[in-house]
Amino acid sequence: MKRIASVCLLFIAAFTAFTPVSWLAPTAAIHSAAEFSVYSDALATNWQNWSWGSTLNFASNSPVHGGSAALRVKYDSAWAGVSLRAPSPINTSDYAGVGFWVNGNGNPVRFYIQSSDSGGESTQFNFTAPVGVWTQYTVTWAQLGNPSTLARLNWQEGAGSVPAAYSLDDIVLIGSGGAGPTAVPTTPPSSGNADIGVDVSVTASSLSPTLLGTNLPAWLGPTMFNSSKFRARVQASGATVLRIPGGSWSDEYGWLSCEMGQNVAGAAPCNWTWAAKPTDFINVIRAVNAPAMYVMNANVTSGEAAAAVAFFNSHITDTTVIGTDIRGTNWYTAGHWAKLRADRGNAQPLGIKLWEIGNEIYGGKPGNQDCVNYGWETTWTCDGTQYINGMGSGANRREGYLELRAAMRAVDPSIQVGAVGHESPTEFANWMTEVIAAGGSVMDFVSIHPYAYFIPPANTSEGFAQILAKPQAHYGPIKNTLQTLFVSKAAGRNIPLYATEFNVVAAQDQDNGQLLTRMVNALFVADSIGQMIVNGYAGANQWDMMNGAAGNGTDYGLLKNDAEMTRSPQYYAYVLWRRFGGAWLPVTNSANAASTLSVYAGWHSPGTMSLLAINKTSGVVTGKINVTGAGGLSGGLVDVVTAGSLSAQSAVFNGQANPSDDLSNAPSQSVETGTGNSFNYAFAPNSITLLRLNVNGTSATAMPAATATPTAIPTATPVPSATASPSPMPTATGTQFPTATPTELPSTHSFKYYIPNVMRNAVSGW
């Protein structure tokens, strides 16, 4: 339907009802008429820098809260300080207090004022600003002990350490006659502590890059695929596998007819000649440098399926004979279809290694064996045994998974061909049980679509709590149930399990609260990927990279199909996981992973540990991180995705609300750890945080061997010219395919793979 010695840690914190204004995405500073700006892009006239033990950049361009610059602060020694001196002492009765914004480093800071150049220190206001987000602080004179004059503003390092740099911006004296900056809590609320432990001496487990996949549907069309902005944002997402040509559309997508822009005799029809062609997919996949996974129309003959493999994977000199199929259509040789690809601008094979036979075959439209009355898929059976073995004879035979797989692998023996499964052994007339019993000894992998909800929880704090708890209780039990089935029906074979579609909601028309588009789904997707990693899934594909808005305003996509190709919050879950690395480690976590903070650890590279944390709460969670089996830590990098609330429909990445297409203006920030094995880190509310920490004195043997990954873009090699060029079309002499027309599902079952309402007006015939 319709998804070494650096350690990486990923945390997810639990949701609470309170959402402080201080965590909202960056906005222009709010100034009253009576306030005075001490710093906004530059230090106010005649104010002076009297800082000590610090390096300051008054014109830093990243990160910036308001305007074009911020004040970047690097303490060079313990107890160093930033000090801004007024031209002459200021009478505090003219103002109500001091306001400023901080993009923090997770280190304590002491803010206070002085009433003279050499003394008169006020009461201290202590705070710890989280990393990677702008937090607003409003400090009243009462909080500072009611000083009568102001000569200097001071921000002093508060932990006796040398922390990473941080930024200050929009520093103002709040006018006594105006509201000044929006009132906010003096410090963000706390959601408690979490003791986090990672032993880097244990052997790590490989993390397959096929777990970071998504879907790329044909209805986006060639214009979108050719957009440089689209390509840049797809590549920057970090998605590692692009499943094509589009969910349930796959079972109505005749690859050859769509390539030719018209129905070809003897081949499956193309119902949408305006949609993306196979060549369009090749071009965009090459441009973003991500492997593809192809869903073969389950209604085609084994000859047409083999010819598709040849089109994508063969050289034009390949003389492998495909021959005439059961319906009398001649599919020539593999080189014949490679020549068609080359004639259309792609001399080199794409090399697709992952293939599936059909999409959700168990949900076939009514009228065939075991199909339900609300079925949605175009197929010839809903019986699992028939799907594997085929049925009938002669020209009327329907070839099954085993026949298509054999013909496809005869063209390219290196490919893996998956079968359609289901997460339940008994639903849809025991579909999964029958599929495993009939083909479990042969199939290269089995595909399921474990969406979390058909009808989602309400868009409330209680509903959000259910969603955030779901990953921890969802993916593990599914894997365990299916593993038991593999033992009983496939002689205990550990069949690789791919979740080729997943997201928080299966049916977009049920998502009236637009949960798919909200920050809560970013945390859900991040935690879902983590749970599939630790539970041994072989691959996963979120639905989808870009979809188009439904009539109720919701949208599955990582990217919105609007003029700006706006990033959904869930987009950034992929960015952080792609930076996590190639191996994972066991991690201990005292926090409740379902409601407060979920954590994943691993190796980014030799010497760099990764820690990915998801804070599911609206308060700061202080992680007390302890790394054993190492000779100490020496700093690292941090990436943070956060939002003002779980219901927010936009997110802030490394302090940028709308970073550049390639994310280059939102770089990772440095983080200080000290030289020991333990340090504290404040995880921002409603956030995903990735720490990449330099770990000393570890052995590279802790890194597992690299997992073999299907590569989509092989190294280019010269392709010999073909000596003969046969007719590009197959010769059809037998039974033709029926012509299918797009149909709407009943109102009670409206699924993602139909053209979104927003796109239909542009398509003639709807």
Image: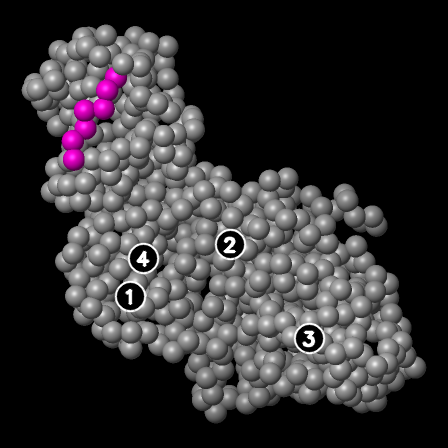
- Judge whether residue 3 is colored magenta: no
Binning the other alpha carbons within 10 Å of mark 3 as few (below 14), some (14 to 19) or many (20 upward) gives: few
Taking depth in this image into account, of 352 and 747 the one nearest to the observer is: 352
- The segment highlighted magenta reads 47-53
Quadrant position of residue 388: bottom right
Position of residue 700 measured from the top left corner of the image (x, y, whole percent): 29, 74
Position of residue 684 measured from the top left corner of the image (x, y, whole percent): 31, 44
Q: CA distance from mark 3 to mark 1?
A: 39 Å
Which residue is located at x 30 percent, y 63 percent?
Answer: 608
Circles 3, 1 touching at the beta carbon (< 8 Å): no
Residue 123 shown left or right of residue 694 in the figure? left
- Residue 69 versus residue 421 in the image, above or below: above
Instruction: Determine whether the residue tagged by mark 3 lies in a helix, strand or loop.
Output: loop
Q: CA distance from mark 4 to mark 3?
A: 41 Å
Q: Is residue 434 visible?
A: no
Quadrant position of residue 566: top right
- Of badges 4 and 1, the one in the foreground is 1
Instruction: Determine whether the residue tagged by mark 1 lies in a helix, strand or loop.
Output: loop
Taking depth in this image into account, of 291 and 335 the one nearest to the observer is: 335
Residue with the mark numbered 4: 692
Instruction: Determine whether the residue tagged by mark 4 lies in a helix, strand or loop.
Output: strand
Q: Main secondary structure of the magenta part?
A: loop
Q: Amino acid at mark 4?
A: Arg
Position of residue 274 measured from the top left corner of the image (x, y, whole percent): 79, 55
Quadrant position of residue 713: bottom right
Circles 4, 3 touching at the beta carbon (< 8 Å): no
Residue with the mark numbered 1: 607
Q: Amino acid at mark 3?
A: Pro
Which residue is located at x 83 percent, y 61 percent?
Answer: 261
